[in-house]
Amino acid sequence: LDVKTIRPQHLNLCPVEEDALLPVPQLSHNLDRVLFNPGVYHMQDGRSRVFNFDPYLASIMPVKEFDFDALRSYVTSSKDVKLRQLSAAHGMKYCGSTSSMTSILSHFHFLLSAWRKPNFAFLSRSIEPESYNFTAISRGPSAAFAHYNDGTYAFDSDKEYDTENILSLLGKSMEKLLTLPKEEFEKYRRTRSHQLSEEERNAQDSFHYTTLGDFMMRSQLDAYDPRLPGSGMFDLKTRAVVSVRMDVRGYEKGAGYEIQKRFGQWESFEREYYDMIRTVFLKYSLQVRMGRMDGIFVAYHNTQRIFGFQYISLEEMDVALHGTSDRRLGDQEFKTSVTLLNDLMDRATKRFPGRTLRLHVETRPTKIPLTYFFVEPVTEEEMTTTQEAGKSSVEELERELQILSEAESEESPNEAESTEQTEPQPSNEETEQIPDELSRQDPQNEAAWNVMMAKNRELLGMYVTIRNTVNGEYVERPTNIKKEDDFDWSVEYAVNELSDRSARRIYSGMKQRRRKVLAPSPSDRWDWYKMFQGKLPELAKKGEQFREMRSQQEAGGPLHVAWEREALSQEAF
């Protein structure tokens, strides 16, 4: 048995091109106050009705009114010329982005931590968790493509089940909302986007590039504040309420749900925080580490209104994931994970040199945890078929938005000038988005599935097992790490190749599990009405009634803001 040892404290992340960094946006509307105060800032105090921030932020611009054509398109790793050039210049064999690598790296966390359960110590006793584990989608198999071109393998996310890409557009519009003054943000409204200069339309995004082993990693930089520790960079995240997340495609029925309080099982910021621990903290913490950032800035919303903001540092996420605020454990686990991926990719590219590869990764909850790593060579045509499997669904949503926008402009040109939202819009939910039954029926999706399930394809199946040593003693996982203590962690690991017969059997089961998690049956759509003992419809209706009552109370009246003692007219905002 070929056993290797990783000493993560001897591995270093190496920044690239620090001096060439483009300007990174800063928070607008005095939102920077949130960065330096633990916990949640309410958009508006429910008791006094005083706004803590500009009331303009409370209502989200309907997605059909925002001109997304005015934004630069996202560039995947395989199409990023600069990323490939940097990789070649620094002799890197592999490259990828935060979005394409974190889902795979998550499975190494499950392996290295022996399925450590999340830590809910920050929650109050007023919430009773339905589960103490990560969600099924978080634990489910991960897939990616390693696209080969001119000596470099670029990691792209596997988009076979991505039918919700249109939701990322709302995320982009809200990024602009949080980092631009009102007057500049309003230029992105469809009726005003002609006012945007070419410089504003073509403004380039800023990135951190970092190397480790043979990997060049790219991380887009959302926001910056020089007063934060380290680089001062942080990620912007928009978090939709539970009733929207549970059926993103049918979000309208849950968009009335409102966050009313700090603590509690429902209608609370605590509920959303609990769900984030189970669904996205692992992914977010990996993104923050890959981008050499400090934390994440979260805006909580229901697709119509923003309820509050919270800054969550990397140390705070580490408490939930690793049980300690000592960053050494999370930092070293990240470096170990990339090193394991590096070794597995070396074996894959040695077996199938110079070819584009499809990767499937899954850590199984066995008594002794192990991670399966499957590699399948694919042609450019096969990769395109899979990557465009959900494209028709996205295009359909884009057409609907265009039709809505044109119809609205024809009916009432002046209505589009309003900053108040009149109907619910899709959420920017980056977590457990579950495609509906269309994903199974779509011909392109079926074609991708048939390509993937074809027999007698070339296949390499491997599995990884590990043993942790802390300060010279074998342990199941590193625990109780304190900043004042010595922490000498090493990881012994072995990679074993599966027989062809075993590989095909296990691989088939893995693909079926992935499909089951990401493409549920049509009947699952109705589960929204039954889950949580039927609470969601009731709470959404309650929220709608509350918002209607509150709107009537505030209609035409003055507004109170925290930074002015005198009431202000609504026209002031």
Image (cartoon, grey):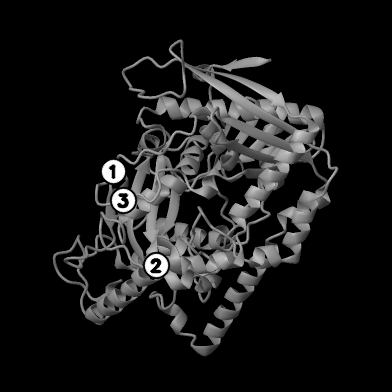
Residue position marked by numbered label 3 in the rendering: 128
| Residue 55 sits in quarter | bottom left
| Earlier sequence position, callout 3 versus callout 2 | 3
Residue position marked by numbered label 1 in the rendering: 36
* Vertical relation: 158 (above or below) 548: above
**Badge 3 local density, few (<14 within 10 Å), some, or many (20+)?**
few
**Badge 2 local density, few (<14 within 10 Å), some, or many (20+)?**
few
- What type is the residue that disc 2 sits on? Gly
Q: CA distance from mark 3 to mark 2?
A: 17 Å
Q: Nearer the viewer, mark 1 or mark 3?
A: 3
- What type is the residue that disc 3 sits on? Glu
Q: Residue furthest right?
A: 456
Residue position marked by numbered label 2 in the rendering: 534
Q: For the N terminus, give its image quadrant.
A: top right
Asked whether the viewer can see residue 14, the reply is: no
- What type is the residue that disc 1 sits on? Phe
Residue drawn where x is 43% and y is 56% of the image: 238
Q: Residue furthest bottom?
A: 411
| Place of residue 347 in the rendered image (x, y in percent of width and height, measured from the top left) | 74, 26
Residue drawn where x is 45% and y is 69% of the image: 529
